[in-house]
Image: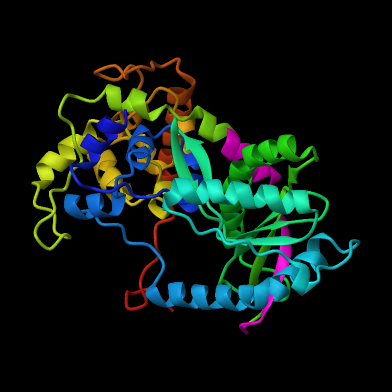
Amino acid sequence: MRQRLTELRGPGVRPRSLDARALAALAANPGCRRRALLDGAGIDKGALAQALGSPAAYGQSQFAIVRGHAFEAKVTSDGGTELLRLLHERLAPGTPPPVPDEVATPDLSAAGPEGRTARTALALREATAAGGWALLQHPMLAVEVAGSPAYVEPDAVVVHPDGSWTVVEIKSFPMIDGAADAAKVGAAARQAAVYVLALEPVAGQVGAYTGREVTVRDRVLLVCPKDFSNLPTAAAVDVRKQLATTRRQLTRLTRVEEIAGALPEGTTFDLRLGDDGKTATRPPDELAEAVEAVGAAYAPECLAACELAFHCRKRSREEGAVETLGRGVRGELGGLRTVAEVLAAAGPEAPEPPVTPGGPDDPAVGALRRAAALRAEVLARAVVPGPRAEEPGCP
């Protein structure tokens, strides 16, 4: 299977790592076989979209990235003293506060993601067995996605003296008057849920080894700048809902080997980069044929989460698919799959040719015809504009 994924990427192309943000987006659309395969194979979807002529138009600016790194460095400086103070204040107010000099900060460096994952598991085991506070900065965790391992890296994980672990998310968006943008907090919660999910099997192994009850807390610490300053503040975020959703959706993903096994022989997403290592030399038509060999499940929400969304939207519009109107509309239309079918269903009784698959008795067809009749009635009763000011008879 590993050889097949290497063929899909192309010779000499290193797999692209799958972060928690991408995992959360993948879990939000488990029916998309295209994204499951491309992410599972470690293919750079951004470069692929660029070569297809539909580059992604979103992403953080360089300024935001630099600002985020600077804020995280401030929060975790001095051995994470300020971070631990905020965590104790928000999540463990009734316990003795951590003493900075007694907080363990293990070195997690190792070769490769597999080595870093093993080193993280060892550090968590040692810190839990010691029974004190520990701060692990940028640990590496593994989570299975469609039958393949994906490696994710939370900002920090704190080990409590009671054996519980807390995920820490550090974001650069502000928390004004104790509240942050709801959409951004929701995205952070979904991302943190992936980290909690990845920690759970490690907690089970550590608990069996140490003989202690080890739990991963379902309330994570979100650290943000306070108001309009660069001073950190924090809030506890309950991720139980996001955790349950992510766990359920990831189990629904079709395994990568099943998707890859159904592809035509010789299918590859190799861009054939030129001498500069950046410019794709493979014809876009060949790439588009390879991409279309894998089924997609496009929805407007993909525009904010997937690099291939603009390509998929273009194809969906060309096919007249109702998915371009949103999942809610798609669900209401039942068996009607294209805009042409919907327009035909809204027409007179017994349209020619007959609507497929629904007929006049189809509930969706009936609802469309009632809506079309109401629209026609409203247009017929539209008020005719009165005479303009320059016309005779106007006061």
Nearer-the-camera pick, 186 or 45: 45
Q: Is residue 277 above or below residue 286?
A: below
Horizontal and vertical percent for residue 74? 60, 79
Q: How many discs mark residues in the rendered view?
A: 0
Q: Is residue 241 above or below residue 368?
A: below
The residue lying at 41 percent from left, 27 percent from top is 255
Q: Residue furthest bottom?
A: 229
Left or right: 170 as drawn, with respect to 383: right
The residue lying at 72 percent from left, 76 percent from top is 177
Residue 287 figure quarter: top left
> Does the magenta portion include 229?
yes
Left or right: 290 as drawn, with respect to 388: left
Left or right: 178 as drawn, with respect to 290: right
**Residues shaded magenta:** 228-247
Q: Can residue 164 be seen in this snapshot?
A: no
Nearer-the-camera pick, 29 or 282: 282
> Does the magenta portion include 327?
no
Quadrant of image for the N terminus: top left
Q: Is residue 269 above or below residue 76?
A: above
Q: Is residue 46 above or below residue 342?
A: below
Quadrant of image for the C terminus: bottom left
Horizontal and vertical percent for residue 31? 43, 32
Q: Can residue 322 be seen in this snapshot?
A: yes
The residue lying at 49 percent from left, 78 percent from top is 67
Horizontal and vertical percent for residue 84? 74, 68
Nearer-the-camera pick, 140 or 217: 140
Nearer-the-camera pick, 191 or 17: 17
The residue lying at 30 percent from left, 49 percent from top is 45
Horizontal and vertical percent for residue 227? 66, 80
Left or right: 263 as drawn, with respect to 372: left
